[in-house]
Image (cartoon, rainbow, N blue to C red):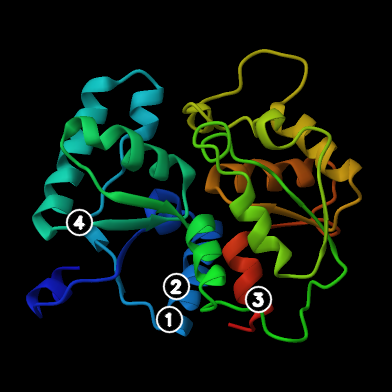
Amino acid sequence: MAEMTAAGEQPEILFWVGCAGAFDDRYKKVTRAFVKILDALGVKYAVLGTEESCTGDPARRAGNEFLFQMQAMGNITVLNGYGIKKIVTACPHCFNTLKNEYPDLGGTYEVIHHSTYLQQLIDEGKLRVSDGKPFKGRRITFHDSCYLGRGNNIYDAPRNVLEQLDADLVEMKRSRSRGLCCGAGGAQMFKEAERGDKEVNVERTEEALATGCQIVATACPFCMTMMEDGTKHFNKEDQVKVYDLAELIATANDL
C-alpha cells in the first residue's frame, strides 16, 4: 500500500490478510490461492504488509477491551491515513470487527468477506470456473462460520461460490442459522478447552463425516484448523480434505 500511495495510485480493494493468513502455514495457502485469483482477474489490490496489525478481535472476545482499542486505533490510523474505502478479507473474525466494531472508533469502510467478493465476481461474469471442473460430482459439505453466518447473516454467498464447481453439495444435520460452532470462536482458539465430555470440533466433524463428504469447505481460518483437527481425530485426514473456498476455486481454474 505504501508503494502504491507513493506512486500516486489507489487500489480497487485493500486485501486485509489477517494474522492467520500471514503467519499460519496452513492458512498462508488460502492467502496465496486468493491472491492468484485476484492476479488472474487483473484486480488492482494492495496489502498493508507490516503496517497491518491484529484487528483486536481475540482481545475483545477475551475481555481485554483496553488492548482491543489500542490495536483497533492503530489500524484505523493507518487505514484512514491511506484513505482506504474498500476492504476484502478471508477471515470472518477480521470481517466482523472491521465492519461492525471499527465504525464506533472512527474507522468506517466498505468491508466484504471473500466469499461475498467471489460471488460478486461470478455474478459480474469476471470469475468463471474453467471447463473440466475437477470437483464435478465430488461430495462437498460447507461448514458455516459463526462470525460469517449467525454474526452477519451470510449463508448464500459461500454456497453460491461452491455451486460453480458442479459438485454434489450436501448439508450437515445442523447448517445455516442452526450450524454448530467449530469450537474456536470467542477467543476459544487460544486457550485450553473447558472441562466436558466431548470437544466441540469432534462433534461438528462427526456431523460432516455423516454426510459422506469427500471435502469439507470452510471460509474461516479458525474453522479450518478445528475441522482439520477433527478429521485427524477420526483418522480421516487422507479421505476427507478441508479446503477454503478460494483454494477450491483456484484449483478448479488450475491457478
Q: Where is residue 82 in the image (x, y as percent from the top left)?
A: 13, 60
Q: Give above or below for 70 relative to 13.
A: above
* Disc 2 secondary structure class: helix
Whole-number angstrom distance, CA of label 4 to CA of label 1:
22 Å
Q: Looking at the image, do the residues carrying marks 2 and 3 touch, with CB atoms under 8 Å apart?
A: no
Whole-number angstrom distance, CA of label 1 to CA of label 2:
6 Å
Residue 250 falls in image quadrant = bottom right
The answer to which of 137 and 18 lies nearer the viewer is 137
Q: Residue 215 carries which label?
A: none
Q: Mark 4 points at which residue?
A: 51
Kind of residue at badge 4: Glu
Q: Name the residue under label 3.
A: 251
Q: How crowded is mark 1: few (under 14 residues within 10 Å), some or many (20 or more)?
A: few
Q: Looking at the image, do the residues carrying marks 4 and 2 touch, with CB atoms under 8 Å apart?
A: no
- Which callout, 4 or 1, points to the residue nearer the camera? 1
Q: Which residue lies most toward the front here?
A: 124
Q: Mark 1 points at which residue?
A: 39
In the rendered structure, the answer to whether residue 194 lies left or right of residue 217 reads left
Q: Earlier in the sequence, mark 4 or mark 1?
A: 1
Q: Which residue lies most toward the top here?
A: 195
Q: In which quarter of the image is the C terminus?
A: bottom right
Q: Mark 2 points at which residue?
A: 35
